[in-house]
Image (cartoon, helix red, strand yellow):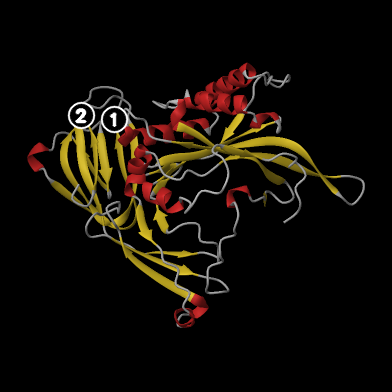
Amino acid sequence: SDGGYHYERGDYDDNEQATISASGPGRVDLTRFDTEYYYDSFEVAGRTFTGNLSEELPLTIELPEGPQTIQWTSDESETATGWSFVLHQAGGTAEFKVQATRVLGSGFEVVPTYGANELQSGAVVVDIVDDTSEALASSRPGGERRMDASADAQGVRRGDSEAHLSERIAGPSKALPAEGGEPWLRQHTLNGRDKVQLLWSERPAEQLSALATLHGLVRTSFTISGLDQTGVTEPTVREALKRAVAAHLPGVEASALRLVGISGISKATVDAGTSNSWTADAVKVEVEVGPSASSPATSLDRIEAQLILASTASRAAAQLDAAITEALAASGVAPPSSEGLWHASFSAPQQVSPKMLAAALPAARPAGGAGGRRLRGAMRPQFV
């Protein structure tokens, strides 16, 4: 909305509360306001608004520099037709300091967040070109390199926004080269001496689906303790997990949900001697969810919200546990006898923009047939 964010609440209900966090400097343009006088109020920048302000609109409230909150509350009786406003925020500079790392893509994305929620539509995406010039590295202390890029059509303030990204590289001025082979099959360590071993992975897609190209997708993962690390890679078990999770996401068909990889987590134990051994403890399943075909523009927000609920001790999490247990039982995997339910612990979901997805596509597909890859005899990993 003319370089700002538009917020609107129509015919509201009793007992509503909402808090919008922002940062100044900026301004709020109040364009519509009709609430129950005195009892239902809207507060911004230390000023409280209530009643019907139609004759005074539009109103502009300046936001001072620093963190700001916009609060809305309604009481237990009587309502009105609500309000609308546009939030404008002035440009700022963000500095990012990262260690030398492998280049995983050609873009950099900054997503505004509040708590566990992301505003993917407000993401700033810029292309990053790695400059290994020794002259450039030596011209700044510590090998600092500065990259300036104007926000594109996905920028927060369309048309006049600019993102300034400053990257400080510790050590060599050149980014480390990516390893050859199949990087998605590399082993890594987790939580000290505990091990994560990839058991199965879907080969990276050569191209995005039509909906993902336009709207992006949501990524998450879930961990199930005690699940057999050998049987979980069977196609029937993978399909059961896929259908159980898809059925509890709004408007998602099983075909829109993709299992990316399955890993086994083994707890490190120390015996009486000097050697270590690992005990199979849990299975981690990585998932990608595409937009709903019926409402692709808004479905990812609803999917993300449902997955956030699933990551908490909520009713949604309990329903997912029951669905996963039932689906696994139907595929021949009995639940643990102690509780009778498998418990899936979901990580916080993340929306990924189309541009970042495109930047991560492999240049060429590795040799081999279509479908996933399963690793056999992989439960005794070596230290890296």
| Furthest residue in direction left, as rendered | 55
Residue 301: quadrant of the picture: top left
Left or right of 346 on screen, residue 361: left
Q: What residue type is labelled 2?
A: Glu
Q: Which mark is residue 74?
A: 1
* Residue drawn at (53%, 68%) of the image: 175
| Furthest residue in direction right, as rendered | 273
* Earlier residue among tags 2 and 1: 2
Q: What residue type is labelled 1?
A: Ser
Q: Residue 36 carries which label?
A: 2
Where residue 334 sits: x, y (%)?
69, 19
Does 80 sit above or below residue 358?
A: above
Residue 24: quadrant of the picture: bottom left
Left or right of 290 on screen, residue 241: right
* Residue drawn at (42%, 32%) of the image: 303
Q: Which mark is residue 338?
A: none
Viewer-side residue, 112 vs 220:
220
Where residue 240 sits: x, y (%)?
57, 24
Pointer 2 with pointer 1, Cβ within 8 A: yes
Say whether residue 104 is visible: yes
Does 133 sit above or below residue 11?
A: below
CA–CA distance between discs 2 and 1?
8 Å
- At numbered mark 1, what does the secondary structure look like: helix, strand or loop? loop
* Residue drawn at (41%, 71%) of the image: 146
- At numbered mark 2, what does the secondary structure look like: helix, strand or loop? loop
Viewer-side residue, 250 vs 22:
250
Crowd class of label 1 (few under 14; some 14 to 19; many from 20; radius 10 Å): many
- Image quarter (top left, top right, bottom left or bottom right) of the C terminus: bottom right
Where residue 245 sits: x, y (%)?
51, 27
Does 81 sit above or below residue 164?
A: above
Where residue 287 sits: x, y (%)?
52, 37
